[in-house]
Image (tube, grey):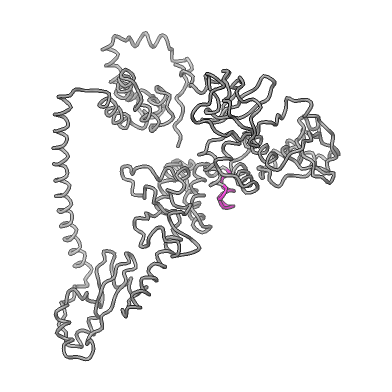
Amino acid sequence: MAKAPKLSTLLIGKEVNLNLNLSDIDGDAHPYAGKKVQIIARNSKTHYQIATDDGKVFVVTTDDWNTYDPTKVYPGDHLVKQLATINLYTDAKVNRVEQLLLGTVHESPFNPRTNFPAAEMEELTESVKTVGIMQPVLVRPRGDGSFELVFGHRRHRAAQLARLEFIPAIVRDLIDAQSAQLQAVENVQRKDLDPIDEALGYAAFIAAHGITKDELARQIGKSRTHVYNRLKLATLHPAGQMALRAGKLRTEVATLVARVPGEKNQAKALALALEGGYAGELKSYRTARSELAEKFTLDLKAALWVLDDAGLVESAGACTACPKRSGVDPIVYADMLDKKGYNDYTPKGDNVCTDSDCFAGKKTAQLKRQQEALESKGKVMVVGNAARKAVDAQGNVKGDYIPVSQMREALKSANLGTAGPAVTILTIQDQRSGKTIEVVKRKEAEAAGVKTPAAKPTNSRMNWNAYELDRKEEEKVRDAKAAAQTRLNVAALRKVRETATRVGMGMFELRLIAQVAIAGVAYKDRDTLLALHDAEDIEALRDKAGRMSHNELNALLLDCALVDHIRAFSYGKPEAPAALLAAATQYGVEIDDVRSAYPAEAAIEEPAEMEA
């Protein structure tokens, strides 16, 4: 059965009124504000192309029009900085084609396209030799009799390779901002522009014209998520760019690699991402995300320093404002803000650090600062490798040191009647946690006649047995706490059930059950459920459930119960959709009638694949 068209598709061809207070790229009143236009294409989730009665085409957002009174200002109206006055193809008066000497036309330094595959250029060159340049390039005068390409760089290079003398061109007086914007709108919409070219084009455009990421997204009609991730992709090092262009990386995996700062660490991340996936396939986004997060992210909850301290390492600044912290760029690091899933041991939340080198540098600086502060108070410090060897991973003192806490009274007796301490008190700085422990050296204490506790056995087997005993004791404590929490939760559940039974089921309960039911649908069945409710992903469906009516919630709950084994796969032994068949019997639906209406050989539209 074919899916019903989405609302966004149904909008194509509709007439709407542009809001009265729209502005053009210069901030002046938009020439078509308040006028009726037609929606002709969809650029992204929120951006559409609209056409005017006289053939001009603009890019606007869903907030920029209404289907009611065009003279009324609606909430959410805002300045529309679109390239609203440039019409590329339909205005014959403006688009006069001239034949320019090829040597007078030069490439733009801001051209988004940097990759010109040899095979494609050879094919285009042969075509140019045979039939010439069929579509003129767009140029702007440079003031010295020469011209700068706005777009048409592939055609220009092919003309050079074909040794043409002239090239057909539309000459347009454009300011820098208009030229760069036209390049963005024209080039990044082309299907043959690779992601790296697109990313570098965005970065060059922002650097040249000093606009924000959000302004760029509005001007080119792309979503903020798309633009933010492409700009992150622009930081991918050359080896990663080559791997992506060679088809060895998925674009979304390359973006994950680009999130790892530093050439050395990014090279390690690239090597990990290039390790083949299942059956030699490219590594999936989910697998790469999990592996890279495990190796290259750190939880700032473990930081030894104050996160807003900008002076600890001046070149790095404060963690709270660092663009490599997940919470500072929630669009690029959206996956890190999710809740932890089952068996997910990677850091989550808005305080995840993605720069392990910077984290280590700040940790070293904080330990050094702490050491200097203690030394200024007369403390004798044990730091660095000596401290690392003296304290194990659990924070226990080992080797030739004894904690002062274990022999405080004995030390007092030994130091009575002396001019100074008979035994030197040392301070060990734990290089893992930053905690300090006062200790004495066993040999020095014994030489001073101080009674010391018996040394712990160094036999590895005996140490392991002691560790196991301690671990089991800790497990007992944790189990007891978990059992107590469970009893409390069950008691609360009984109370809630008792109250709910008395009050009765309402919309709150239905929506709560729907949220749980959606989460319980198996991964293999989610595409079917999303297609039934026209939702892009599970989070969108859960959000939609929070606004559904009583009947819609009933239908959703039934779908969650029946969707199991609906989708058939070409591999493995097919399983009958038992729940669906039982429901069909209950409601008198004859499967044979359905089968005759939709024969097996009929083409059935597949549900849209979930985004990674």
Depth check: give the residue in front, 153 or 46.
46
Image-based side of 113 in relation to 20, left or right = right
Image-based side of 508 in relation to 331, left or right = left
Q: Position of residue 408 (x, y in %)?
A: 17, 77
Q: Note whether 565 is above or below 384 in the view shown.
A: above
Is residue 242 one of those drawn in magenta?
Answer: yes
Residue range corresponding to the magenta coloring: 234-246
Depth check: give the residue in front, 386 or 107.
107
Residue sitting farthest toward the front? 72
For the image, the number of numbered tags is 0
Q: Within the image, what quadrant is residue 548 found in?
A: top left
Q: Position of residue 604 (x, y in %)?
A: 46, 18
Confirm whether residue 17 shows in the render.
Answer: yes
Q: Within the image, what quadrant is residue 520 found in?
A: top left
Image-based side of 514 in relation to 50, left or right = left
Is residue 332 one of those drawn in magenta?
Answer: no
Quarter in which the C terminus is drawn: top left
Q: Position of residue 25 (x, y in %)?
A: 64, 36
Confirm whether residue 245 shows in the render.
Answer: no
How would you classify the magenta stretch by its main secondary structure? helix
Q: Note whether 222 is above or below 6 in the view shown.
A: below
Q: Residue at x 39, y 51 (%)?
A: 351
Q: Position of residue 354 (x, y in %)?
A: 44, 53
Depth check: give the residue in front, 468 or 45.
45
Image-based side of 158 in relation to 552, left or right = right
Quarter in which the N terminus is drawn: top left
Q: Note whether 606 is above or below 300 in the view shown.
A: above
Q: Note whether 454 is above or below 582 in the view shown.
A: below
